[in-house]
Image (tube, rainbow, N blue to C red):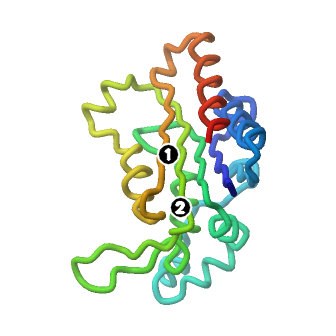
């Protein structure tokens, strides 16, 4: 399977970076073709400019030309894997900006055809979604507040993929209190889950 792994964390020595390396290695070991995007390492600019916002619907090609390698990778992928920390109940700003500047009309979706309709999915070639994330909150608190980060990926984004797209959510909760054994166990869990795909 063609797997695109998108990583977002500013520290290359972080636990999140170790999760990114584990994800890429495990997918390759399972015989998948892997492309990786490390947003911070590549210096991705997440800011949607005024010019880009004005062109967003009438001329999305203007933005697409500026982020073409990312659009090409997104169009290539059958399996999207995101590796990031959950900060303030969602993905880091750089990853959110990547979604805004790369998941464009004509790439990820077509605008709704009429009032009251939803966007038309444009990533029907994506048959699998995996999210690997960490968070300081315990699992029960995220459940109390409705787990907005998880909903963004497993409901909002997944709605643009193939019907029947399989989803895997892997999260290490309570990062501020996690022991070295907890972190090692989660790394092993991520590796095992991705090798099994």
Residue found at x 55% / y 75%: 107
Which quadrant would residue 141 be assigned to in this image? top left
Badge 1 element:
loop
Q: The N terminus lies in which quarter of the figure?
A: bottom right
Image position, residue 146 (x, y; %): 28, 39
Q: Distance between the residues labelled 2 and 1?
A: 10 Å
Of residues 44 and 180, the one nearer the viewer is 180
Residue at screen point 73% across, 69% down:
69
Mark seen at residue 152:
none
Q: Tell me: residue 75, above or below residue 106.
A: above
Q: Please report contact status of discs 2 and 1: CB closer than 8 Å, yes or no.
A: yes
* Quadrant placement of the C terminus: top right
Labels in figure, total: 2
Circle 1 packing at 10 Å, graded few (<14), some (14-19), many (20+), is: many
What label sits on residue 91 in the rendered view?
Answer: 1
* 57 to 143, vertically: above or below: below
* Left or right of 14, for residue 179: left
Residue 29 as seen in the image, left or right of residue 58: right
Q: Pointer 2: residues within 10 angstroms few (<14), some, or many (20+)?
A: some
Q: Mark 2 points at which residue?
A: 99
Q: Earlier in the sequence, mark 2 or mark 1?
A: 1
| 42 and 114: which is toward the camera | 114
Residue 90 image offset from top left, x and y in percent: 44, 44
Residue at 67% of width from left, 40% of height from top?
Answer: 10
Name the element at disc 2.
Answer: helix
């Amino acid at each position: 399977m063609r797997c695109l792994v998108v990583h977002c964390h500013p520290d290359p020595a972080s636990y999140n970076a170790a999760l990114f390396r584990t994800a890429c290695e495990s997918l390759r070991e399972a015989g998948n073709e892997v492309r990786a995007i490390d947003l911070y390492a590549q210096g991705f600019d997440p800011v949607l400019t005024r010019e880009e916002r004005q062109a967003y619907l009438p001329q999305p090609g203007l933005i697409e030309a500026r982020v073409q390698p990312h659009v090409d990778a997104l169009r290539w992928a059958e399996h999207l894997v995101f590796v990031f920390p959950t900060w303030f109940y969602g993905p880091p700003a750089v990853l959110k900006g990547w979604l805004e500047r790369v998941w464009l009309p004509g790439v990820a979706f077509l605008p709704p055809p009429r009032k009251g309709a939803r966007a038309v999915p444009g990533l029907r070639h994506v048959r699998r979604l995996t999210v690997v994330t960490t968070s300081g909150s315990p699992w029960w608190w995220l459940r109390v507040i409705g787990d907005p980060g998880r909903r963004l990926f497993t409901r909002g984004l997944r709605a643009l993929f193939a019907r029947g797209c399989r989803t895997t959510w892997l999260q290490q909760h309570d990062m501020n209190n996690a022991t070295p054994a907890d972190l090692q166990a989660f790394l092993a869990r991520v590796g095992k889950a991705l090798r099994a795909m």
